[in-house]
Image (cartoon, rainbow, N blue to C red):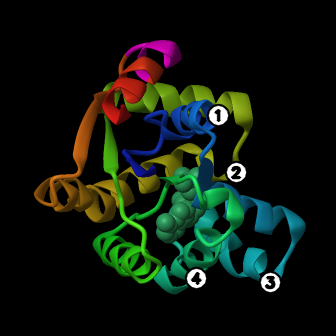
Amino acid sequence: MNLVFLGPPGAGKGTQAKLLSAKFGIAHISTGEMLREAVQMGTELGKQVQEIMNSGALVSDDIIIRLISDRIQVADCKKGFILDGFPRNLSQGEALGTLLKNSGKALEGVLYFVISQDELLRRLENRREAEGRVDDDSETQMKRISVYEEQTAPLVDYYSKLGLLKRIDSLGSVEQIHSLVVKAVE
Ligand code: AMP
């Protein structure tokens, strides 16, 4: 089962991806986590992306597509994977289509986590306090939301036209949303 989790930053994609990945034994691939790890370890990649991540903008498509293309070949992806935070714009969406086709894989669905702007801002504020993420200061948050609206939101239409989009109302508790996610993929 190969899935994409789509939605604004703070919609709960990461939490839900972890739960679903544990339930079905499929890989959870978070490009944001991979990049943060590279930054923490001080690798070449980390140095390359640190500044842009802190600004809330998107890292170049080339870097991300290379990361994903290697990552989906790893053995833990055999049973399937959840892409959390990728694709982030239409060209990444198209590149993903090509990558999957070339490796004989396909997407079963795209789960779109729907959430109001007010709830989103409230959650981001909580997360900033809880995790102290450097890219979660309020200026970066606003940038991340505007980047989402301009570049990522068009993927909703893109996947809807491909007949892959499933909407998940993301207002409830973690457990409630998890059952909606399970229902959507079963
Ligand atoms: P996330 O944890 O998914 O919110 O990602 C944190 C940051 O990593 C983003 O604000 C971007 O700077 C970068 N990033 C993560 N995924 C991507 C992607 N697919 N394309 C470009 N940049 C990304």
Q: Is mark 3 within 8 Å of ligand 1?
A: no
What residue is disc 4 on?
66
**Residue 112 seen in the figure:** yes
Q: Quadrant of residue 167?
A: top left
Q: Quadrant of ligand 1?
A: bottom right
Local crowd size for mark 3, using a 10 Å CA cut-off: few (<14), some (14–19), many (≥20): few
Q: Is residue 111 left or right of residue 179?
A: left
Question: Closer to the N terminus: mark 2 or mark 1?
Answer: 1
Most foreground residue, 79 or 64: 79
Which circle's residue, 2 or 3, is located before the other in the chain?
Answer: 3
Q: Is residue 81 magenta?
A: no
What range is drawn magenta here? Answer: 172-177
Mark drawn on residue 137:
none
User: In the visual, does 5 lie left or right of 68?
Assistant: left
Pointer 1 with pointer 3, Cβ within 8 A: no
Q: What label sits on residue 134 in the rendered view? A: 2
Residue 143 drawn at (x, y percent): 44, 56
Compare marks 3 and 4 and give the one earlier in the sequence. 3
Quick check: 84 above or below 147?
Answer: above
CA–CA distance in space, label 1 to label 3: 31 Å
Number of the front mark, 4 or 2: 4
Q: Quadrant of the C terminus?
A: top left
Q: Is residue 182 left or right of residue 166?
A: right
Q: CA distance from mark 2 to mark 3?
A: 19 Å
Q: Secondary structure at mark 1?
A: helix
> Where does residue 131 sit, x and y in percent of width and height?
72, 35
Task: Give amino acid for label 1.
Answer: Ala
Q: Is residue 57 visible?
A: no
Q: Residue at x 28, y 72 (%)?
A: 90
